[in-house]
Image (cartoon, rainbow, N blue to C red):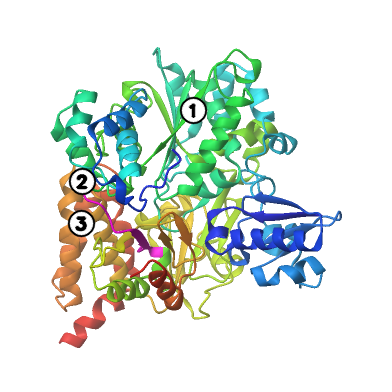
């Protein structure tokens, strides 16, 4: 009997380790032979710890499982969820990037290969750098970190740059609230990221990569480090990638708690051992990036999607999605929801379907008031905008952004003035200090919102003006996008900004 | 690496010797851009980056002490004084706020009688805000030393704080 228990940190935070121990202890007590396999998570976080049992007829799900459920689980009397892949939340998805996440032991390279791993890399090894970049261009893959810049074009700039040294930097500084897909894939399928980075190296002529991982993710740091060691031992990384003669080296670098280091130029400064302040562009990192050399800086999900593009072909990938948003997006459903977790689907699903159907509405059972899409710098959406299809241009057109595709749902107890204030406060705490609109503006923003809260109506146009200045004048997205949550809260929920004012009058 | 950024302080490690620190610097100096790895290594060993380390790092990397200080003070993780025996971090970000994170954080501060970044009088607990632990679908989230906790409610918070000796 095979029993699968996730080792993902969300599952662990909900008690998966204690369940795994209880399973082994109980099985030993009964003299029952079990094969206990620790996997990533399937992404159905409301069911975690989600234990899967395979008695030879496929994987049946049970969850959430507590250690006290273990005897019944082994007796076969515990009520289950049926075949895991038939659970509606899972069955509705199109899993390309996350195909293996939750399915296999993340550190078992043999299993990785058995489930399609390394097929993309083997194909890429037979292609020229130009052909590799063309394939990525053809797939329509755009930066999954938030900016949505075409990945193939970025790679081509690095490929054509003349330099004796080039780098691939993976941005795993996933600081946005409501997002956890980077963490999930690193903990659940790290070889996929390694494979994607090697293909990026082959395409651009880079032979060294860094994974810049945030310190808030200790489990991901550990798994990534182990996966890199295993990949070196297996000859996947190193001086002779799979016997091809091409070299690729990879290192993990740990951040130090600065949100702004998720911005690519700030990340590069941090990697070099400097204060994580933002750099002015140009020069583009593609031409002068890490240590002054041409550098690809890509998000985890962009790089982890590359292997499947090479495995199945660019055209197959581009068949998913709509308009200029090609392929699939791993959407992270978070906050006050009934069914929270990761939902990978082709672009185009309306926001309301995600919130009301997939996420099942709020966990509290109260009406949905607002949904923040794209992290702390993303706009709030009201239910009146729920017909907006999930895509880069569509969200831009609705005055927001999809960012890293995290959606955070709030019920009607949320005070949107407080949320706007928090956005400014967060910007003030995390500002790198280089540009004035962000450094000073965020502090003034908190003060101005406090004036509104105290009933000063004259502060509303001031806040609007300040947001305009931050949006137009900031050097990066931290100061430039903080106005999104602030202004959307002010525009969509004016009552929250007026109630206290009326009370004061 | 891997390491836990904020380990509880080993009492015997309070007066690190120059030689020990030099060895830690030496273990990382071969890396490209070694300053952050060096600071992490020192903090991982001592729970903070002691003052004696700055001139040694500056010397080894051929940068000024001001630059070392500038980098250290930029990042939230690095501390120049030891934390309490345990570090409790509570997520303040939006997804946790959507499920009552702010009230939970307030309760924690009240129970400990300190503000953010404060350490209890008995030296047992330092409380830090954290902006996202990636547990956004099972908030409110907290981290006690290296261990992550999801769906923390008031009772669980009380248990945690009692366990760490607050």
The chain that hosts pointer 1 is: A
Viewer-proximal residue, A180 or A456? A180
Residue B147 picture location, percent across and down: 46, 57
Secondary structure found at label 3: helix
**Of label 2 and label 3, which has the lower sequence position?**
3
Which numbered tag is attached to residue A250? 1
Q: Report the residue that reaches farthest toward the front.
A: B12
Secondary structure found at label 2: helix
Mark 2 and mark 3 in contact? Answer it, CB < 8 Å.
no
Which numbered tag is attached to residue A473? 2
Q: Which residue is mark 3?
A: A442
Residue B79 picture location, percent across and down: 25, 48
Q: Decide if residue A324 is in sight here.
A: no
Viewer-proximal residue, B92 or A2? A2
Secondary structure found at label 1: strand
In the picture, measured across the screen, residue A426 lies left or right of residue A331, that is left
Q: Are marks 2 and 1 on the same chain?
A: yes
Residue A59 picture location, percent across and down: 78, 56
**Which residue is found at the position 65% from the left and 41% from the top?**
A319
Categorize mark 3 by other alpha carbons within 10 Å: few (<14), some (14-19), many (20+): many
Rendered view: A297 above or below A505: above
Q: Are marks 2 and 3 on the same chain?
A: yes
Question: How far, Cα to Cα, is label 1 from label 3?
Answer: 37 Å
Q: Is residue B93 magenta?
A: yes
In the picture, measured across the screen, residue A422 lies left or right of residue A451, that is right
The chain that hosts pointer 3 is: A
Rendered view: B161 above or below B11: below
Query: How many numbered markers are drawn?
Result: 3
Categorize mark 1 by other alpha carbons within 10 Å: few (<14), some (14-19), many (20+): many
């Amino acid at each position: 009997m095979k029993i699968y228990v996730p080792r993902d940190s969300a599952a662990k935070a909900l008690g998966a380790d204690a369940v795994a121990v209880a399973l082994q202890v109980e099985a030993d007590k009964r003299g029952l032979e079990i094969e206990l396999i620790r996997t990533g998570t399937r992404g159905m976080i409301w069911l975690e710890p989600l234990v899967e049992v395979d008695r030879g007829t496929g994987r049946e799900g049970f969850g959430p499982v507590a250690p006290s459920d273990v005897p019944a689980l082994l007796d076969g009397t515990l009520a289950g969820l049926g075949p895991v892949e038939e659970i509606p939340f899972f069955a509705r998805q199109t899993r390309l990037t996350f195909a293996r996440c939750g399915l296999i032991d993340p550190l078992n390279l043999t299993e990785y290969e058995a489930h399609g791993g390394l097929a993309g890399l083997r194909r890429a090894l037979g292609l020229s750098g130009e052909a590799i970049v063309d394939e990525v261009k053809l797939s329509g893959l755009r930066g999954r970190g938030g900016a949505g810049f075409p990945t193939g074009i970025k790679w081509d700039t690095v490929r054509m740059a003349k330099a004796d040294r080039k780098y691939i930097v993976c941005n795993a500084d996933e600081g946005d609230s409501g997002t956890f897909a980077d963490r999930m894939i690193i903990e659940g399928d790290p070889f996929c990221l390694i494979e994607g980075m090697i293909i990026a190296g082959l395409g651009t002529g880079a032979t060294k990569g860094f994974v810049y991982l945030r310190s808030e993710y200790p489990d991901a740091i550990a798994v990534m480090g182990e996966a890199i060691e295993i990949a070196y031992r297996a000859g996947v990384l190193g001086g002779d990638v799979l016997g091809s003669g091409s070299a690729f080296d990879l290192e993990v670098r740990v951040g130090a708690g600065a949100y702004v280091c998720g911005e690519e130029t700030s990340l590069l400064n941090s990697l070099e051992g400097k204060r994580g302040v933002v750099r002015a562009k140009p020069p583009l990192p593609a031409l002068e990036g890490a240590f002054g050399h041409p550098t690809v800086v890509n998000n985890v999900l962009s790089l982890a999607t590359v292997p499947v593009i090479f495995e199945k072909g660019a055209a197959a990938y581009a068949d998913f999605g709509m308009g200029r948003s090609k392929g699939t997006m791993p959407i992270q459903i978070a906050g006050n929801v009934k069914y929270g977790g990761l939902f990978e689907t082709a672009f185009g699903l309306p926001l309301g379907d995600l919130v009301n159907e997939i996420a099942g509405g709020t966990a509290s059972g109260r009406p949905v008031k607002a949904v923040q899409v794209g992290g702390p710098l993303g706009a709030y959406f009201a239910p009146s905008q729920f017909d907006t299809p999930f895509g880069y241009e569509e969200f831009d057109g609705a005055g927001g952004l999809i960012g890293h595709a995290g959606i955070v749902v709030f019920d009607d107890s949320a005070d949107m003035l407080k949320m706007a204030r928090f956005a400014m406060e967060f910007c003030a705490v995390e500002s790198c200090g280089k540009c004035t609109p962000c450094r000073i503006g965020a502090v003034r923003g908190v003060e101005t919102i406090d004036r509104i809260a105290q009933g000063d109506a004259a502060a509303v146009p001031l806040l609007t003006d300040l947001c305009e200045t931050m949006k137009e004048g900031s050097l990066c997205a931290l100061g430039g996008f903080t106005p999104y949550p602030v202004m959307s809260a002010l525009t969509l929920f004016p009552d929250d900004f007026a109630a206290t004012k009326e009370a004061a009058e | 690496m891997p390491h836990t950024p904020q380990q509880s302080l080993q009492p015997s490690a309070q007066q690190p010797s120059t030689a020990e620190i030099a060895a830690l610097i030496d273990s990382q100096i071969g890396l490209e851009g070694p300053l952050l790895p060096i600071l992490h290594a020192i903090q991982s060993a001592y729970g903070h980056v002691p003052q004696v380390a700055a001139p040694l790092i500056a010397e080894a990397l051929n940068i000024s002490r001001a630059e070392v200080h500038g980098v250290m003070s930029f990042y939230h993780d690095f501390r120049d004084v030891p934390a309490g025996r345990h570090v409790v971090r509570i997520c303040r970000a939006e997804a946790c706020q959507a499920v009552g994170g702010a009230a939970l954080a307030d309760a924690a501060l009240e129970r400990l009688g300190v503000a953010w970044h404060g350490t209890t009088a008995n030296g047992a607990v330092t409380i830090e805000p954290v902006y996202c632990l990636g547990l956004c679908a099972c908030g409110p989230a907290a981290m006690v030393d290296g261990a992550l906790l999801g769906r923390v409610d008031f009772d669980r918070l009380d248990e945690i704080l009692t366990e760490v000796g607050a």
